[in-house]
Amino acid sequence: MENLTAKLIPIDKGSETIILLHGLFRTSRSMNKAGELLAAYGYNIINVDYPSRSADIGALAQQYIGQALKQCATEGVKKIHFLTHSMGGILLRDYLANQAIDKLGRVVMLAPPNQGSEVVDKLGSWRLFYYLNGPAGLQLGTGSNSVPNRLGPVNFQLGVIAGSKTANPFLSRLIPDVNDGKVSVSRAQVAGMQDFIVMPYSHPFIMRRVAVIEQALHFIQQGYFAR
């Protein structure tokens, strides 16, 4: 990738917001690096911290995305973008399936289980799985009734970045496709997305890679990934 950093443009400070949504069994700390890099370009950052194991996807989406949007309303921003990791993307899809977001700009999802994950299919019945992942984790299977597959195509400007390396060979063996240790490249995709790219990173760390964050910002600014 030739000099991607040079293609990124600083904006008027605080004129646009990027809401960050972390994944399952993570906290907002996992998105700190992304927040710092994006803030350096003038974006107002709202790094949402939500208890991902405490409730189902719909309840989490309504409460915590709703809170972030109320914060945006008080700041008078012109556009609201989203950068999500893993299940954070499904929360946003669920929220947008029920109501529109005023001033919605562009969305980038990192390693989202947009068509579910075989890991949930094969381990979801284990008591330990529920203990670690809670009710939302059980909703991320690949069946037709899973939350991601019930939501249908997206109708907003979306770019998806999938990972192709794994840090968990055991879980990767449960997935019959190139994957990041949790989500396959093919199941990260969703009908209606505007652009899609695969990068050589694993599920737990993809959101911390500078090359990934810069690609996300390029999509937010231009509507497509740099190649």
Image: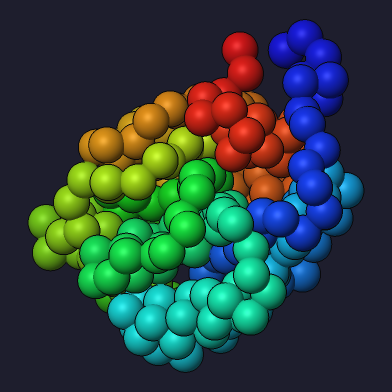
Location of residue 47 with respect to 18 vertically, above or below? below
**Residue at 64% over, 63% down:** 77
Mark count: 0
The one nearer the camera, 174 or 59, is 59
Q: Considering depth in this image, is 64 or 179 the residue closer to the camera? A: 64
Q: Position of residue 52 (x, y in %)?
A: 51, 79
- Asked which quadrant contains residue 189, the reply is top left
Which residue is depicted at the point 82% across and 38% down?
A: 10
For the question of whether residue 52 can be seen, the reply is no
**13, 191: nearer the viewer:** 13
- Let me know if residue 6 appears in the view: yes
Residue 59 placement (x, y as % from top left):
36, 86
Residue in the picture at 71% in, 55% down: 15
Taking the image as shown, residue 119 lies to the left or right of residue 179, namely: left
Q: Quadrant of the C terminus?
A: top right
Q: Position of residue 144 (x, y in %)?
A: 11, 56
x and y percent of residue 216 in the render? 63, 38
Give the residue at the far bottom of this rendering.
Answer: 54
Tell me how the rendering is colored: rainbow
Residue placed most toward the observer, 115 or 131: 115
Q: Quadrant of the N terminus?
A: top right
Please report the residue visible at 69 percent of the width from the left and 69 percent of the height from the top.
47
Residue 210 appears left or right of 67: right
